[in-house]
Each structure stands twice: as structure tokens, then as C-alpha cells.
Image (cartoon, grey):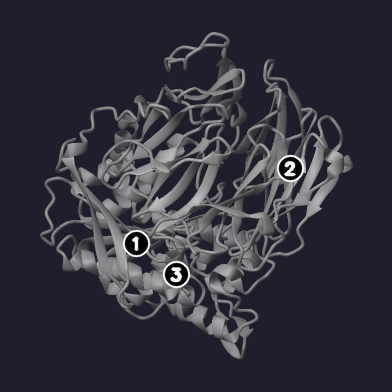
Amino acid sequence: MTTNGPSAPQAKRVPHERIHHGDVFVDDYEWLRDKSDPEVIAHLNAENGYTDAVLAPQQELRDRIFAEIKGRTKETDLSIPVRDKDWWYYARTVEGQQYGISCRAPYREGDSRPVPTPEASLPGEQVLLDGNVEAEGKDFYSVGGLALSPDQNRLAALMDFEGDERYKISVRTISTGEVLEESVTGVGYGLVWAADGESYYYTRVDEAWRPFQVWHHVVGEDPSADTLLFTEEDASYWLGIGGTHDDRWLVLSLGSKDTAEFHLLDLQDLEAGLRVVQPRTPGLDYDIEIDGQRLYIVHNRDRVDYDVSWAPLATPGIEHWQLLLEGGEGERLMGVSAFRDFVLVGLRSGGLATVKLLPKEGDGFGVLRDLPFSGELMSVGVGANPTYEATTLMVATESFVEPRSVYDWDTTTDEVTLLKRREVLGGHEPSDYQQHRLWATAPDGAQVPISLVAHKDVEADGTNPVLLYGYGSYESSIDPYFSVLRLSLLQRGVVFAIAHVRGGGEMGRSWYLDGRLEHKRNTFDDFVACGRHLVDTGWASPDRLAAEGGSAGGLLIGAVINEAPELFCAVVTQVPFVDALTTTLDPSMPLTQGEWEEWGNPLADAEVYAYMKSYAPYENVRPERYPAVLATTSLNDTRVFFVEPAKWVQQLRRTVTSDQSERPILLKTEMVAGHGGVSGRYESWKEAAFETAYLLDRLGATQIVYGG
């Protein structure tokens, strides 16, 4: 693609010295941080105008891709009804409407699961929340959570109209839709009703956007009368709240990257106050599940990949933990869910997510057993199952080539009944596609998995357009998943691959530990090794290999193109964390102090500072031929500020030796959105079509060659 249009915006240079540990770094673009400055907004608008002009020839392709997404999607649809107490809960989508509609219908004793039709209501159907009504007249709308009162007569919804993840709580009577109050604002995630349904608990965030307090609010009273229940003073700990299936307990979780602490409040005995499960012990990470008078604890006390223990709820401290389940070789135990007759155990095995069942037998437990689901590169997870007494559970499976399928699984007979498979309009035949697990060798000898999918007729002959995706932080795992959007790539001959680099959790806790702190460079080296493996094995060639990553995955891509710019022809970075060192040096910034256990503390440690500076994308742009770059961001993002890609794009343009008429460097900023991008499904599809068209154009793969 050659551009002969407008010139790229050049921000003025205002030298700003950043001095730490005797090192002086001159940052010419730090002034772009202030979004209240009209000159900053004008610059971002100019960048948007430039990007629009450069990519204007792709409009027809964008429209085609949007039409393909829309044409494959069943727009008027609904989820599978899930029973909770006296109601069946489900969600609807309606053609032409941006947002989902949460609904319920009454359950009567002996009823089997209803099979509603997308076009018709169930008898007695009630609308809990219609996102289209709530979003009317708003540029942005997102729900941070819904919470039902214990009697299921009231609903509390956390609503965000800016994209900054600071929520207003809307409380309403479900049967009438009457809004009871919307006076509690500026809150964080999490809401738990008190036992009487007349009050609730919620969280507040500090100036650094860290959830740090729990408050109690009585519906109808002024928020100034709210009562503070708990404050977490340590800035490295995040706070969260949740409830239990029996509505008995408020569970308060506190966690850093390495250490956890839980407190419990008996909602039927408030006078007893909060009590701690196990006080924080540096390096002891644990999670809990309450099961009557028993507590399950998933912990790393004895094994890096975690075990499951249990303790009496009355005496939950570590001295009372009794081993229940030790993971097998190569298994990372992730969590447990308790039911009357069994415990479900979530784990990772062989690099994939799965679930096993541990039956209860008398006062003890039986033999751990597998679920009756298997398939190549298949992820298995448990769906919504809120009924404690249930013996039939919803289980979901998914792969690159098999759309998400939800089953009822009878745990007593192992009988499986398909409830719903995601429908791909126009037809989809899984056998038309191939999927593989490849292994790349990192510089230190580590074997790095690559998951790959392509049309069945694609051959590894060195001519294919390839998109390589990566993340690699926070022990997050990117499992194989089905995507309607990806079909637009695969039908144009694109090979899609995920590099499961260290820093993620695909291969267990050690995989994460080997890609953080002083080992962070492994993340970048792994990704480069994966790209080179695709080239060496004939799947790709550098002139048709693109890369993509978002947030911390944007840091990955930014570091990788500094390390190996010759390996890729184009990259897309979404809300990229590319000015990581500047952010991590400022403890007043959102997330920073809690992030020191992920990246290190460069403010306090000169070696950490030097190490981070050695890979931080912004500081290491060099005069080489770089790939084409599209960076996307949002003005109201509270996790990765827009200034990071804005500065990075300027540094790239000023430094690289690429012919920028051939390989342009572009920035696109959503002016009313947050970390997750725009809101509304059609707007999200347009955003996806924009980025996909860009990649297809750069890869020279704009025409459908298979199917269509």
C-alpha cells in the first residue's frame, strides 16, 4: 500500500527530563498526557483524520467484512435459560439493537428447562434490564455487573456511560421496572446484597483506580450515610467482593500478584463482623469456596501448580488445612465449585483448560474423574450452574473450528445432551479447516506452543499470509476459541496463530513465573521464536507475516518489533502498554503499585529500572526498517492511558528508516470509550472490521479464495 495523501501529524517537541538512578531520559512528547488541554485533543483529532485519509481506500473492504460478520450472526437470538430459585434467567438480542436484554420467566416445580424462541416471549416473562433503553442518547454504555436481591425482587446494575470503569448503581423493582435509586456513583466492580434485600455492599476505588474500600448502603438513604466496612491500605493489594450460592456470606478478597487474603462476613450474623480465613503470608496465594460448614482452599503452599485442601469453616486457618487433591504432572489447579453431591475442579492440562469432577461419598470423597468431552485443541468449561442441588450441569466446549457448544451433562449417568451450538448463518463446516499445535524453540531452549488454524487447502509452502497473536502477562491464557470474524481471514487464505508465550498461564504457574519480573524478556524472545518457527517451517514469510496484541500484549508487540523489525510486515496494537517504564515509575498512576510484582519496582531498584528500560518499547525505537503500525486507543481508558500510544507513534515516525509512504505509522483514538473499546455490538463489529481490513490489506489477502 502506497500513500501519497496528507502528511502525518507531527506533535511539537517539549523536552521533559525523566531522571532516575542517575539516568536521564529526555521525553519530547510527555506533554501529550493532559487530555484537558485543547491542543492535545486537536492533535488526537488530527491523528484520526490522518488515519482515516490513509485508510480510506479500505472502506469498501471494511463494509464487506462488516457485512460478513453480520451475515454470519444470528442477530435475534437468546441464551439458554438457567434456573436460579424460582426463575429461569436468560438474555435476548434483537436484530437492529446494539445491546442485550436480560430477562426471566417463572419456574414451577417439576418444570423442565424451557426452550423459548428468539421471536416470542415465555409465559410471565419479565425484563430485568434492556441495554438499548439504558443506552438511549448515550455515546457509550457498559454494564459492570448485575446483582439480584436474595428474594429476587430487586435488581442492582452497575452502569458506565464514559468508558472509565467508574459505575453508577441503579436499583429497581423487577416486576414493575421502577427505579428506586441511582444515587451511589463512582464505584468499582462488585455488589453483594444484604440478607434482608434492603441494603447492599459495594466497593470504591482510590485516586489510582484501585478498589480499596467496602461500603454498606441502605436503599433509599443518602450515600453520605453509608457505612465503611473495610479499607485496604496496602497499595499493592486489590480488593474485590462476592457472594455465595446460598446468599449467606459476603466474601472479601484481597490480592497482590503473589499473595492473597480472604475475609468473610456472615450476612445472617452481622454482629460477628469480618473474620479472616488465613492472614496474608508473603508468597502464599490461595482462593476459597464455601460448602456448608466446610471450606475448600486452592493454594500454592506446597506446590507451584497448586493443591486443593479443606478446612472447617469455623477454623479456616492454614494450620487446619487438610490435603484433598494434589494435581497431576503438568496440571495447574485453578479453582473449585461446590455442589451438594460433588466438587468441580477447574484446571489446565496439556496447555488447555478443562474440568474434572470429585464425587462426595459420605463424609469423604471418591475418585476424581474426567468429564465426557474431548477433542483436538478443545477447551472445556462449566457454564452457569447456580443451583447447589443440581446433578445435571451445563458444560461448554469450543475450539478453533467448532463453534461454542453448550450441553447438559448428567453427572450420575454421564449422558450428554446438546442444548445449543452457536449458529453460523450461511453454513460452517468444521472439516473445511485444519488446526495444529506446533512447538517453537526459544533461545534458552524452552519449547513454546503455537496454536494454528487455517483452511484445509492451505499448505506450508512459504507463501501464506499469516497473523500471529500474543499476550503473555498476568498468567492469562489465550485458549483456542471459535470466531465468526476469523472466518473472514481464513476464507481469504490467512493462517491465524496464537503464540502461547511465557508470562501467560497456558503451561502452568512456572510458565508465568518465567515470563515476569527479571524474566520478562522471555516473553518477547518466545514470540520472536514463534514467528521465526512459522517462517522456518514454511507457514509464513516475513513479507506476509503480521502480528497483533492488546494492552500488555501491545507491550509485547512493541518490544518485539524493536527486537526483530525485519520479521513482520505489519502490526496492530490495541490500547498498547508501550510506555511501560514511565507509567511504572509513577506510583500515583492507576495500577502502578500493584503492578510492581509483575514488572518490578524501577522507582526503588536501579537494576529493575535498567532492565525495564532495556525492553520498554518507547525507549528502544531504533533507526531500522519497521513494519507498518496501526495503534488504537481510547481517550477514557483508565488502565493504559491514551498518551502511551500517542507518544510511541510520534517516536516511531521520527526514528524509523522505513519508507512511511509504504509502511505508515497510524494512530486511531476513540474519543468516547475505555479500555475495552467502543460499546454496542454493531459498533464493535465496525471496529473489528476496521482492524481486519487493515491487516488483510497489508497482507495482500483482500479477496476470498475459499468458500464465500
Residue at the bottom extreme of this rendering: 22
| Front disc: 1 or 3 | 3
Q: Amino acid at mark 1?
A: Val
Identify which residue, 605 or 138, lies in the foreground.
605
Q: Earlier in the sequence, mark 3 or mark 2?
A: 2
Residue 702's spot in the image, x, y percent?
21, 48
Marks 3/2: CA distance? 34 Å
Q: Earlier in the sequence, mark 1 or mark 3?
A: 3
Q: Which mark is residue 515?
A: 3
At x 50% / y 44%, what residue is drawn?
Answer: 678
- Circle 1 packing at 10 Å, graded few (<14), some (14-19), many (20+), is many
Marks 1/2: CA distance? 40 Å
* Relative side of 548 to 466, left or right: right
> What residue did someone put label 2 on?
202
Q: Which mark is residue 571?
A: 1
| Front disc: 1 or 2 | 2
